[in-house]
Amino acid sequence: MKNNEKITMQTVLKAIVGSTSQVILGKQTQVKLSLACLLSGGHLLIEDLPGMGKTTLAHTLAQVLGLHFRRSQFTSDLLPADIIGVSVYDRATSAFQFHPGPVFTNVLLADEINRATPKTQSALLEAMEEQQITIDGETHALPKPFFVIATQNPKHHIGTFPLPESQLDRFLMRVTLGYPDAQSERALLKNQAGRHSMTGALIKPVCDVNTLISLQQAVRNVHVSDQLLDYLQDLILYTRTQFSTGLSPRAGLGLRLCAQAWALLEGRDFVIPEDVQAVFASVVSHRLAAENSEISKQILERVAIR
């Protein structure tokens, strides 16, 4: 990567993080993790209590990145056709016409995804993995880039369904926002941030589709040494020996990509172990059915850096 290209990319990345952090106050780490997920081409799961800013974060990221955004509210009566679309018979042409659903966008916000039934949740599996949907034997490609940002309420809340393991594994990262600190909450109470600021002049796109695709390519060009790959493999192997269901090959590839994205966000064109550790909990905790980051911390403590 040429030096001037590196400077330009860092300028764009800092602008994305800065603009998003003007709305999501005091959560720069979560903002960077979410951006690392999208730069890696993955899908993001945001889990927290209602009213913590999950939907606002998803909408802000789409707006700052200059991406087309659609939202679908997941409820128990939602049908797969409400997500992917439906073929309707047209009497004028004597043929079925496909009417695309909200999945045909750059960023699909699946709001409160675990309030929908497993049948409806499974409608997203093909879209998330292959960026296409198949209906009535015909395959339709989705726009590029395509991201699913899903919000999820805690599992103990009334009216929620557990996400199947196959669905969880398709989410590259899971992040939680948590309560704001005192200073950030004071700013919210003064109406100095939050969702209302997105409608004003405060938040404007600082990126476009072509720039985002270039950033995603830059992530894949971040150097990963053989020693770093050894460390990644040790972490993956440890989960497979200590848990009934360890990390899948998809999860291992995702962990490497997220570490590369984090390195790029930190201004480096090579990965160090600290990059892996920074994204580790967000990539693996939901795959290991861990409700908090303590298990991830234990894994990092027990697997030595080579």
Image (cartoon, rainbow, N blue to C red):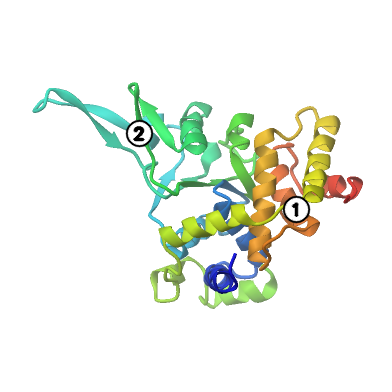
Residue 255 left/right relative to 107: right
Q: Nearer the viewer, residue 41 or 96?
A: 41
Residue 182: which quarter of the image? bottom right
Q: Which mark is residue 293?
A: none
| Observer able to see residue 79 | no
The residue shown at (58%, 76%) is 187
Q: Nearer the viewer, residue 110 or 160?
A: 110
Residue 97 left/right relative to 210: left
The residue shown at (62%, 44%) is 172
Q: Residue 77, image x and y in percent? A: 42, 32
The residue shown at (40%, 76%) is 201
Q: Which residue is mark 1?
A: 276
Q: Which class describes the residues within 10 Å of circle 2: few (<14), some (14-19), or many (20+)?
A: some
**Residue contact between numbered discs 2 and 1, judged by CB atoms under 8 Å:** no
Q: Residue 23, image x and y in percent? A: 53, 69
Residue 81 left/right relative to 248: left
Q: Secondary structure at mark 1?
A: helix
Q: Residue 163, image x and y in percent? A: 60, 33
Asked if 39 appears above or below 84 in the picture, the reply is: below
Q: Secondary structure at mark 2?
A: strand
Amino acid type at mark 1: Val
Q: Nearer the viewer, residue 7 or 50?
A: 7
Q: Which residue is mark 2?
A: 140
Between the C-alphas of marks 2 and 1, the distance is 36 Å
Q: Residue furthest front?
A: 2
| Observer able to see residue 198 | yes
Q: Across the whole image, how many numbered discs are drawn on residues?
A: 2
